[in-house]
Image (tube, grey):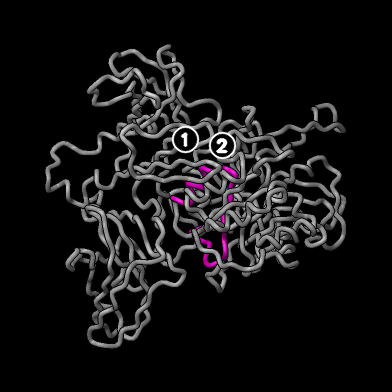
Amino acid sequence: METTQVTLAVRGETSPGEVIAVVGSCEALGNWNHQKAVILHPGGDDGNLWTTTVTVPKRVLSKYRYFKGFFLESKSAGGPCQVIVNMWETHHQPRTMSPTGIEQQKNTDEVKCVDSGWLTCQTEIRLRLHYSKTSPVSITKKKYKKSRFRIKLTLEGVEEEGDDEEDALSPTSCHKTTTLEISMISADGYKSRHSQPECGYALEPSQWTEYSIHTMDPDNLELTFEFFEEDMGEHVVQGDAHPGHVGTACLLSSSFAESGKDNGVATLPIMGRNSRQTIGKVRVDYLVIRPIKGLQCDMSSSFTRYWKKRSALDVGHRGAGILYRIKFRENTVASFKSAAKHGAAYVEFDVHLSKDAVPIVYHDLTCCISTRKKNDKTSLELIEVPVKDLTFDQLQLLKVRTNINNWNHCIPSSIPEHVGFNIELKWICQMKDGSWDGNLSTYFNMNTFLDIVLSCVLQKGGKRRIVFSCFDPDICTMVRQKQNKYPILFLTQGISVRYPELMDIRCQTTQIAISFAQSENILGISGHTEELLKNLSYIGDAQSKGLVVFSWGDDNNDHENRRKLREQGIDGLIYDSKAVWSAGPVCSAVSPLCHYTMTFALYSCLHLLAQTCTGPYRKQTLLTIQPVCRCNFIQHHKSDEF
């Protein structure tokens, strides 16, 4: 193939050790692989003009994007370098060139339409202080009982022995790639800072305070909380270098790995400044986010923040819906096809894992199994069992009985390619009274759970329109940080008379849900129609902040309610209205098991059932049985647009 040289130039400011690079669709530009990207060289009077010359195919359209990041040494000899993508261009259509001359220079241009990167090789540690249960700070020393505190987090253990001045300026230095960001989220909005005042920030009962640490050395950090009295008053000593400083609490990041948990709560003693005595304790909520194992995202496209504005989309709730008087059961491929046939742009369904880590499509966290007593063949007893405690094979044995003998068990093998998927990631929630959804206080490891589901969708999703959603804000955060392609919506019930209040502050109102979605830079929220109808202004408020707004709930089944929401410019409506989705003969269940629907659409769509499945979980997911409800879940779609 005939080639030619092209000089690329772009202007951009960088931090110490950071570089600008280019990645694109041809081999010379790395085939969208960030590890094979081409680094540009700084120049110009201010050092902000970055250029490079590459050899590309002549008269062939090449696509490319710029990004800022760190290029680090490989962990293994001869291996690819490790690349941290800090910011990258996410235009829906990437830059293009089709050179014809011997050497051409692309016009100098500034980087525009940028978005934050994702976790490629680094780990993110989140430390949170909040009043979801009680005050995170508990003081036992009488002297400080009535004091209000400001808190500052400092990081230690980053610089290694032998670091000299030259090494400190190297882009491979660990301490240059460790960053700290502080977020403060409330119903009134959010603030994000990369630096802290000398005495830190005050804690507020209505505020969620979060420290986000990106690091290449997640097991070798000393995280120290410094406590300062907010009203120092008479306790200030003249000439004190640290006025109002009363104590410290230290947390070693290695304790996360030792505990075997990636999320939880650590209770730390607060040690007095001038003594070895404790003056109280602090409860620190932590979350560790790791890169997806065995999978690398490319940089060809990103829809994490992209949404094409149009009239409200109809989303079929669990396919055709949860109403019993319909032809097709909820959460089955037949139900999804029925919804698509009747005009649904997307179908919504719930995904979680079986005991042996196979993704399944099923709504409830628990299911009921009917048992007969040994000497009584007529009476049945229902036993409620968590779905996570049953293997895929065991779940396949569960049946739903109906009074229609010829009910359609031959589930169609594909979903129309124009139908998008709204995949709700099922996770447990804690109520304000301390109880847990499904009585499950423990669940899967978050990183493992998401690695399995995201790997399958990323590998087999093709160009179908896919939007994730979840009621758990941490899951939303992790989906955003672990991959760079698919968007996620934060599901929120807000203030409701139908559902119990949730423990997590971020889940308690639609207003704070909006602030959370903004702070995490996710696509938007899916609000509960019950609250949206009472506060229609929330829709415009969220959209004015760059968020997409869907709605869910039984109220959406009413045509008049949908009309009101459409008038407000809602982006999507999730509902199962019988008037829209149902068709055909009535199918009513005679078994009490119907409430806990046992028809599992087990998809080769998530392709853990497919024989082509690769990656670290392959041994767990290759099955020896032929699934009853096997289907080609993910189909290619002609358009990249959402």
How far across and down, in percent of the image, does residue 283 sit?
A: 45, 26
Left or right side of 242 for 133: right
Determine the secondary structure under disc 2.
Answer: helix
Q: The N terminus lies in which quarter of the figure? A: bottom left
Residue 467 locus on image (x, y percent)? 57, 58
Pointer 2: what residue? 505
Q: Quadrant of residue 182?
A: top left
Image: magenta residue range: 457-481
Specify the farthest residue to the bottom: 101
Judging depth in this view, the residue of 543 and 613 nearest the camera is 543
User: Can residue 262 be seen from the camera position used here?
Assistant: no
Q: Residue at x 52, y 58 (%)?
A: 546
User: What amino acid is found at the position of numbered circle 1 in the picture?
Assistant: Asn
Q: Is residue 200 left or right of residue 350?
A: left
| Residue that badge 1 annotates | 263
Residue 448 is at least partly visible in this image: yes
Determine if the magenta segment contains residue 280. no
Q: Give the image location of residue 105, x and y in percent.
A: 25, 80
Depth order, front residue of 318/46: 46
Q: How many marks?
A: 2
Residue type at mark 2 is Ile
